[in-house]
Amino acid sequence: RKEVEQDPGPFNVPEGATVAFNCTYSNSASQSFFWYRQDCRKEPKLLMSVYSSGNEDGRFTAQLNRASQYISLLIRDSKLSDSATYLCVVRGSGTYKYIFGTGTRLKVLA
Amino acid sequence: DAGVIQSPRHEVTEMGQEVTLRCKPISGHDYLFWYRQTMMRGLELLIYFNNNVPIDDSGMPEDRFSAKMPNASFSTLKIQPSEPRDSAVYFCASSYLLGVGELFFGEGSRLTVL
């Protein structure tokens, strides 16, 4: 079983739609969680951290469910510019080893 | 401030040749990571350093791969001999202790082994 699993998609949604991605992780001792965004043929960049209480940044909301070992990302009012691959990232306890999921591809259609 | 700088951006080589990828982290960052990205396997952590010391190299695929960090501003990833299955994009990233979670990636080195 992979340490971090994501649905690869693609998710094709119209502009203005709300879309949600989930990501599951296998190590219950994982300590920190993040969402990164990667545009085609570019490097990954941090989108947001995921806190236990959930957090929001504009149209983006991230949540963590430790009991079920998954994190989620919700994007409201999708824009064409949101088209990218979204990478779930997990860091274990006592380590700086950041494990990336394979990513979920989002395409926002006009 | 300059970001993470990687070279070369593209490399095409023949099987059996030695490949050296280079990385200059962001000044002041004390963690450096090497990742490999392929369509099939996504981003895989190969090795990471803290204060120039290798901490975890469990992701290095085999003895053909080696990485060094002789000083705080330079790291290399070497493949010798290279094989077609090594074709991938190799990313270097750096981070600092208090910036937990934010890895700053270079633009990557796209390697093609024929």
Image (spheres, rainbow, N blue to C red):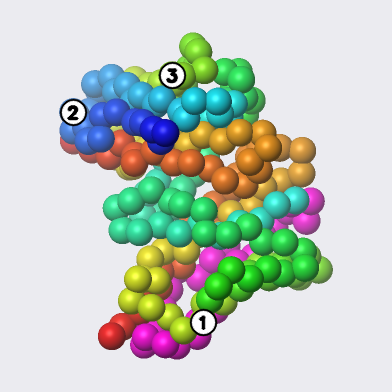
Q: Is residue B20 left or right of residue B91?
A: left
Kindly identify which residue carries mark 3: B74
What's the chain of the residue with tag 2?
Answer: B
Within-10-Å neighbours for mark 1: few <14, some 14–19, many 20+: some
List x then y, in percent, for residue A55. 68, 68
Q: Nearer the viewer, mark 3 or mark 1?
A: 1
Q: Nearer the viewer, mark 1 or mark 2?
A: 1
List x then y, in percent, for residue A60. 55, 72
Q: Amino acid at mark 1?
A: Arg
Is residue A4 rendered magenta in the image? Answer: yes
Name the residue furthest top: B70
Within-10-Å neighbours for mark 3: few <14, some 14–19, many 20+: some
Q: Identify which residue is drawn at 25% across, 23% down.
A: B16
- Magenta highlight range: A1-30
Q: Disc number at residue B49? A: none
SS at circle 2 = loop
Kindly identify which residue carries mark 1: A76
List x then y, in percent, for residue B58. 59, 32
Is label 3 on the same chain as label 1?
no
Quarter-wise, where is residue B55 in the image? top right
Between the C-alphas of marks 3 and 2, the distance is 26 Å
Q: Is residue A33 above or below residue A19?
A: above
